[in-house]
Amino acid sequence: MKRFLSVRQWAATLFLLTCFSIATLFCYVNLHTDAQFEAFVEDFFLQELRSNPIHFHYTIDDPSIYRIDESQLTLPVYRAGDAANDVYALSLLSEQLEKYEHRRLSKGNRYLCGLMRSYIDTLRLTSSYPYFSEPLSPSSGAVAELPVLLAEYRLDTAEDVELYLSILEQIPAYLDGLIVYEREKAAAGLFMSDDAADKVIEQCDALMDKGELEERTHFLEVTFTNRLEELVRQGILTEDASLSYQSENNRLLTTVMAPAYDRLADELTLLKGNGKDTCGLAHYPGGREYYEALLRLQTGSDRSVKDIRQLLYDDLSANYDALRRLVQNNDALRKALSSEQSLLPEMSPEEMLSELKEDMAQDYPAIPSGASGETIGCTVKYVDDSLEEYSAPAFYMTPPVDNVGNNTIYINALDTAGDLSLFTTLAHEGYPGHLYQTVYCQRYWAQAGMTPLRNVLYYGGFVEGWAMYAELSSYDYAARLAGSEHPEAAPYYAACRLDRQIQLCLYSLLDVFIHYDGISVEDVQRLLAPFGQTDADTVASVYAYIAEEPCNYPKYYLGYLEIMELKKQAAEVWCADTATTAARCDDLYSDPDFLNFFHRFLLENGPADFKTLSESLWTGKND
């Protein structure tokens, strides 16, 4: 007998069909939005990389994965007025991001979209002051950076050699673009001081030394030849091809790159006199506002300048009191601090890295395994003699995102003479510092199927704050390592750590005073005198460096303090989630389980700005 649905059954069926249709449509819209956003993110990532073939080569090992012809990429050349157009371009980018509704994105994409919005908004603030930026900074500008990048340019194939030589041919146009920008800065009344210009001019002469080029002993010739000889040993190049490439490299260095550096030096000489004497940003119209925006961009901290001052004041006071108490009744310690002691066993840099890797294992999560089971290696090199004066004490060369197995750390012998300074520097650059954090993040993103977008979003406060956190923790590792032979190592290294923190905190405060309050070199001399720094030349050098490199010290130390503030918040979350007793919470910072929880949170949610990280800690709790 044929049966028919009742009215009630029909109504229920229609209701279920409607719900199913709505759910299907909802899933489609959300998945479609996720797909659109992910395509946008990948396109943004690749566009940023395509804009500079050197950075592309460092970031991507196999360009075929992204269907990119690396030979078609060219160095960015600044054109007149480009700086003023950046705000418009960033506004368009911000409008595109606003099209993606947060509620329609997956949790991971919501987080990434929020990061991008925050980053672009901050970048727009700094771009509103187009001529405050200084690409030719004496300490970190293009003049000194470019030769280092060329010396480490990866040569795995004959095509890589061709790409390298083509980049040398493009350097004159690249530097000519910087000259155009410097002329615009001068017209805007924002050209560098004569002292800073003299330093850059001196760099141009020293880095492209004519005598070394003629004798073929220049480091860009020596390093190039060494890389080619390795390709010959591997059978990738013939001896004749290697010699031909070496000849072409010499020709380009002597007839293309060196003249371009000379022309830049000549142009800077002509522009001298257009800038003020060395001073902070506060002395320029709009300088304080630019400094506030730059401080937020460089450090990732959204605190006001007033709150940053207070955070630094409190830290300086606490560390100064702790150091005073430590040495107050310890004459031996007071004498030891006046000259760096060698208490560590004799070790090579590679052995120190191995020791650090072993020491950190209990408190930090293991690096995720790679898809091909690749091991993680690291080569330690020393900065060429000709670059020592212009290089940082050390720096880590970030490996390609698709091949993180081979890492390089450069050491500047001028700044790492003692065993403790070398040990803590390797902790900063290697384990558990930059190398560990970089490789962990890249492996984690790869496993999660995420575009490594944060390689092109700049979070200096997180990256350098993490490395500073790693460096300062390594004093405890050093004390344990030296302890069996030198029981005096523990208080000595504790004092060394406090002394390091006081110096970095003090210089971070000076950064605020110089660039926001506009204090003079005489003011700095009065401020440093109670800390034992009275030499006029040293004070002048400190003032000049901070004036020429705004936000550099806060990027490191304020970044570190923000991580420590996050650590306090993480302890509250941990105690609440694990029902840990108050007494147990007091000793939490030495608990390996808590430390693993906190470090994993930072590694899997960063690099990022600290407001985003704090919100993620409380809302997501690392789930």
Image (cartoon, rainbow, N blue to C red):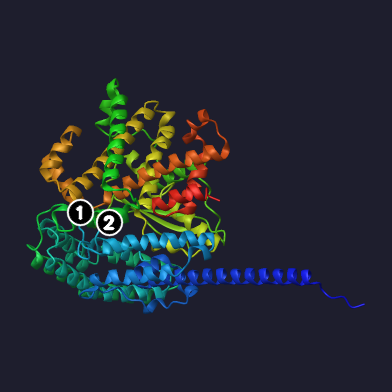
Mark 1 vs mark 2, CA separation in Å:
9 Å
Vertical placement of 78 versus 354: above or below? below
Disc 2 residue type? Ala
Instruction: Find the residue positioned furthest to the top.
Output: 329
Residue 262, picture quadrant: bottom left
Query: How far across and down, in percent of the image, does residue 180 sit?
Result: 18, 72
Residue occupying image coordinates x 20% and y 34%: 531
Q: Which residue is mark 2?
A: 293
Which quadrant of the view contains residue 93? bottom left
- From the viewer's perspective, is 593 left or right of 194? right
Label 2 Cα crowd, 10 Å radius (few <14 / some 14-19 / many 20+): many
Residue 248: image tag: none
Q: Earlier in the sequence, mark 1 or mark 2?
A: 1
11 vs 159, nearest the viewer: 11
Q: Position of residue 485 (x, y in %)?
A: 41, 28
Q: Residue furthest front?
A: 7
Residue 448, image x and y in percent? 55, 60
Label 1 residue SS = helix
Query: Can residue 238 be seen from the camera position used here?
Result: no
Residue extending farthest to the right is 1
Q: Could you say where residue 219 lies in the image, as x and y percent from the top left?
A: 27, 62
Q: Is residue 445 left or right of residue 500?
A: right
**Which residue is nearer to you in this view: 123 or 306?**
306
In the shown orientation, is residue 168 left or right of residue 233?
Answer: left
- Categorize mark 1 by other alpha carbons within 10 Å: few (<14), some (14-19), many (20+): some
Which amino acid, mark 1? Answer: Arg
Q: Which residue does the image show at 24% across and 60% down from the upper left?
A: 141
Depth check: 460 or 230 in front? 460
Where, quadrant-wise, is the N terminus in this rendering?
bottom right
Residue at x 18% of width, y 46% of height:
542
- The residue under label 1 is 288
| Relative depth, front residue between 46 and 355 | 46
